[in-house]
Amino acid sequence: MIELRELTKRYGDRVAVDGLSVRVQPGVVTGFLGPNGSGKSTTMRMILGLDAPDRGEALIGGVRYRDLNWPLKAVGALLDAGAFHPGRSARAHLTALAASNDIPGSRVEQALRLVGLSDAATRRAGTYSLGMRQRLGVAVALLGDPGVLLLDEPVNGLDPEGIRWIRDLLRGLAAEGRTVFVSSHLIAEMALTADRLVVIGRGRLLAETTVAELAADDDSLEDAFLRLTSQATDHRGVGAS
């Protein structure tokens, strides 16, 4: 489980995340939904200890990320699809990460198969298309067979077949009892992927809901999403990405 307690982050006079309190439960795909600039990426970075909150805390299984003994075995994350050495092959990249986290080498081949990169595993990752880079990023997230997964806009760069693949993968991982937290600004995609929705605007929690509940009073999901996020427009400060 992921628990956010009054999580707050400012950059100068700009409020990126504003008192965010959320519990992300295992066994379901939780969509982290909000417009571009609403604070989704900043929140995920604080969960992973990459940014320090000004107030509040982010806990994974009751502890901070920095206190995990083997982080890659507990939490898998995709924040930046380009976070690899372009001269290394996908296999070499995963092998180095596995060695540094006491993960068996056999898991490298499993992760490559899971994301469909076995045939391209010896190619330099710098030659990959954006969609293949996203797949490599997902392989990194899955490498330690973690119980918690955070993915920031994972469908970026994927073709329709790839989008169906990531959708099925995430739902399958949640069905295994894992905590799956996936961000997007695309309500239509989240409607097909997520069981629960956490909606934010300008860093503030706007709703914890389901797709059906969100659209109950509107003609379309897009209308419901716009109606909800417009509630944050009178909030002072500008959100971060």
Image: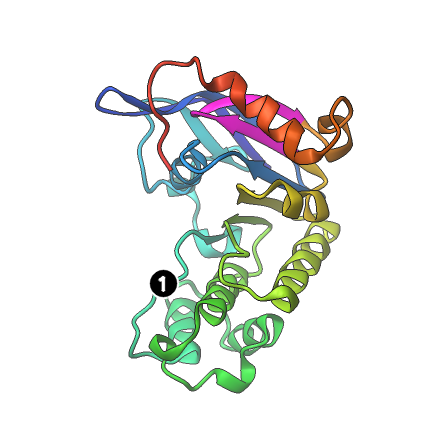
**For this view, does 111 lie left or right of residue 17?**
right
The image shows residue 113, relative to residue 75, as above or below, that is below
Residue under label 1, please give it.
82
Residue found at the far left of this picture: 12
* Residue 204 part of the magenta segment: yes
Residue at 21% from the left image edge and 23% from the top image edge: 12
Residue at 64% from the left image edge and 35% from the top image edge: 222
Quadrant position of the N terminus in the picture: top right
Image coordinates of residue 96 in percent, x first then y, are 37, 72
Residue 163 visible somewhere in the drawing: yes
Residue at 67% from the left image edge and 56% from the top image edge: 167
* Residue 41 part of the magenta segment: no
Question: Which residue is more in the foreground, 123 or 51?
Answer: 123
The image shows residue 56, relative to residue 118, as above or below, that is above
Residue 23 visible somewhere in the drawing: no
Question: Mark 1 Cα within 10 Å, few/some/many (few <14, many 20+)?
Answer: some
Image coordinates of residue 47 in percent, x first then y, are 43, 38
Residue at 65% from the left image edge and 68% from the top image edge: 161
Report the amino acid beneath label 1. Gly
Residue segment shown in magenta: 197-208
Question: Which residue is more in the foreground, 121 or 144?
Answer: 121
* Local SS, label 1: loop
Quadrant position of the C terminus in the picture: top left
